[in-house]
Image (cartoon, rainbow, N blue to C red):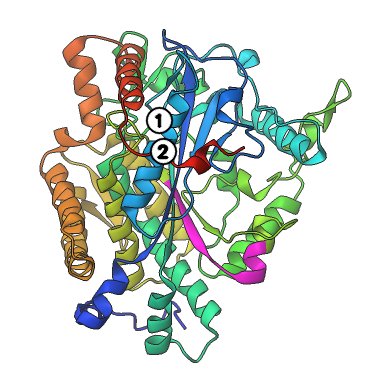
Amino acid sequence: MWTENDRWDFNRNLQIFSQSSYASLLSAGFHGVEREALRVNADGSLNLEPHPQAIGDKFTHPAITTDFSESQLELITPPFPTIEGCYQYLAQLHHFVASNIGDQLLWPASMPCRLPSEEQIPIAFFGETPEAKTKEIYRRGLALRYGKAIQMVCGIHYNFSFDPKLWDMLHQHFGDEVPRQEFINDGYCALVRNFLRLRWLFVYLYGASPVVDRSYDIKALNQFHTLGPDTLGFPWATSLRMSQFGYSNEEQRNFRICFNRLESYIGDLRRAMEMPDPRYEALGLYRHAEQIQLNANVLQLENEYYAPVRFKQAPLAGETSLDALERAGVGYIEIRASDLNPESPYGLDISRLHFLHVLLTYCLLRHSDYCSRRERDEEINANERRIALEGRMSDAEISFCGKRTAMPAIARNFLQDMMKVAGIMDRGGGTKCYQMCIQQALAKLDNPNATPSARMVAGLQDTGGSFIDIMKKQAQAHHHHYRHYQGASDPSIQRE
């Protein structure tokens, strides 16, 4: 069993998987993507019309729904055994949606388009059935607790699981004294702890939200710099979305969800869902005979926990996500720390999926101590905030093992280790894509101006335009791309 005192050695694991009979296991797995996108008008303002009927029923469609707002699409791929298959399906979803929403555009950035007043932002409506009303009331509670603007921040979620054969091999080598699923649970917990320790690196490489429109009405706007017409942000920021100004909840820092064991994770979430919060009790449950939140607890539902990563298990009929985890253990993990890349029509390039696959595999193969509260506060969370707001500064530092360290130096060490994993994965899969994505990451480390966040700021400076102007042109270019997509369509996309 993997504990804080285990002997899980990275170099030993590299030797094991370098064997030809095992190398292919590292490149195998199942991949899924969820892309959020705002529907906008030609002028870059939020489209306030209901979810278009031509793209299906948002309550029943397996791949096209809404997130918080009626104006906020969520495109969902099923799990695929290859990254290429997943990416192709994501492209088909965009093609289908763009062909059925008329002149509306998909906003390409994580930070919102020009927003109307909070009262005008429409909460998603799913119908009058009890289940549909629960979804709507939950969203009313989010609006009440945190405001609507923050809910309009969009991103990419990456769902991933290792091939069962990999777990069989690892279980046989390292943990056959414990039940297989318990071993898998501990393995995913170890992986997630390492991912949390390294997510600052991912934010630096792929953060793409250094600025926001002035209509993003939050109290902290006076802390921002003016970087263009009606455009605010920080000159060296990588991801406002992953900072305290984005899709985060400062109030949730008052409680901790433990990732050391699955039982602790489930127990902490259940306690948060059962613990009354005086602030939310003061808001009440009803106004004008209409229910405005599901309950007055710290979390209305488990999904309200704004985590950069979550443990997941496919629920049976009538089960909640936590019920499914408790019954069957971890089935896959959901990585939620990914900004939309405005330069990509699909919100991300395929190379980012290859990078995430390498990163998660690396996080599995290296030693993973339990996380202490000190480490979560003083290193993990502090590092992400620092890189999110100042990551491209020449003297950027992170805290690691209790010491402040120059970010580029330690990032290079991690990427060089990841390159070793990528080499095995490429050999096992007969590809070059994994090593190539690490080479691209190293190039961004050598040249911060090559990062997506730097390119966005440079675009503002070069054109003298606003965030809205630049993203509007990008949205129009993407719409043209969708309309001329040449890939074959999957008939399941049209199913309601």
Element class at badge 2: loop
Q: Quadrant of residue 240?
A: top left
Q: Tell me the kind of residue under disc 2.
A: Ser
Question: Image height check: is 467 above or below 302?
Answer: above
Q: In the figure, is residue 254 to the left or right of 235?
A: right
Q: In the figure, is residue 345 to the left or right of 269?
A: left
What number is the disc on residue 291?
none
Q: Residue at x 32, y 11 (%)?
A: 469
Asked whether the viewer can see residue 51, the reply is no
Q: In the figure, is residue 391 to the left or right of 197?
A: left
Task: Return the residue at label 1.
Answer: 95
| Mark 2, other Cα within 10 Å: few <14 / some 14–19 / many ≥20 | some
Q: Residue at x 67, y 70 (%)?
A: 327
Magenta span contains residue 142: no
Residue 339's x, y, as percent? Answer: 37, 37
The region drawn magenta spans 324-336
Q: Tell me the kind of residue under disc 1.
A: His
User: In front: 448, or 341?
Assistant: 341
Disc 1 and disc 2 in contact, CB within 8 angstroms:
yes
User: In front: 96, or 411?
Assistant: 96
User: How far is the residue under mark 1 from the one under mark 2?
Assistant: 8 Å
Residue 48's x, y, as percent? Answer: 58, 14
Magenta span contains residue 326: yes
Q: Residue at x 43, y 69 (%)?
A: 190
